[in-house]
Image: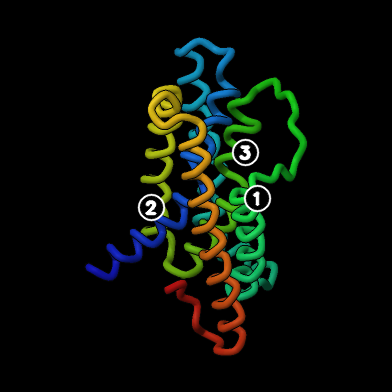
Amino acid sequence: MIEKIEIFIACFVALFVVLDAIGNIPLFYSLNSRYSEKNRHGNVRRAILIATIILLPFLFFGPRIMSFFGISISGFKIAGGIILFIIGIKTVLGIELTKKEEYSDIAVVPMATPLIAGPGTITTVMILAGAYGSLIPFLALSANLLVNFLILTYSENIINLMGKQGSDVISRIMGMILVAIAAELVIRGFGGFLAPGIINLS
């Protein structure tokens, strides 16, 4: 039981860092600023729902998808670690990798994807499912989406409390943690090739 709790905590933390709800608060707030409070909350609800629909297939069928294409969990850890490393570096240094665009439905793009259900999150849920099965990562993902929903729904209040600078500092700390997680994934991915059968993240 204790081991399952530890796995849940590890999955929750990994997803919380890659989802980066706190770091996304200023962006979500700026995207929603021209809407009424009712519509802002509606955008957040739709974004979380759409992100859930995107992520669940990768959570439950990700390992089968990898198996179908002949991709090992070790290889995916290395590839996923590289993606998460890039995202972490971008967060720490405040680098924009894509140009800003205007979207007709911000709840779908960019809120649901790529800000919530982006490459980093998809990669993480697939790796966690491959390492621990679907149930515990599903619970950790559900808890994270609930936390994200609450944080983003009350983003205006949080910004007033923390300020943009405080949010930026937390986002960069989360980015550093994400870089560390990415490095561990790459190391263990290579370890899996050297010692086949070792697939745990811990």
Report the residue marked by disc 3: 113
Report the residue marked by disc 2: 140
Q: Answer yes or no: is residue 61 visible.
A: no
Where the C terminus falls, by quadrant? bottom left
**Residue 99 image-quadrant placement:** top right
In x, y percent, where is residue 169?
A: 50, 43
**Cα–Cα span, label 1 and label 2:** 25 Å
Neighbours of disc 3 within 10 Å: few (<14), some (14-19), many (20+):
some
**Between discs 1 and 3, the one toward the N terminus:** 1
**Residue 100 image-quadrant placement:** top right
**Residue extending farthest bottom:** 195
Q: Answer yes or no: is residue 165 visible.
A: yes
Dot 3 amino acid type: Thr
Q: Nearer the viewer, residue 185 or 89?
A: 89
In x, y percent, where is residue 128?
A: 48, 63
Q: Residue at x 43, y 60 (%)?
A: 134
Dot 1 amino acid type: Lys
**Residue extending farthest top:** 36
Q: Residue at x 41, y 55 (%)?
A: 13
Residue 31 is marked as none
Above or below: residue 27 compared with residue 124: above
Report the residue marked by disc 1: 90
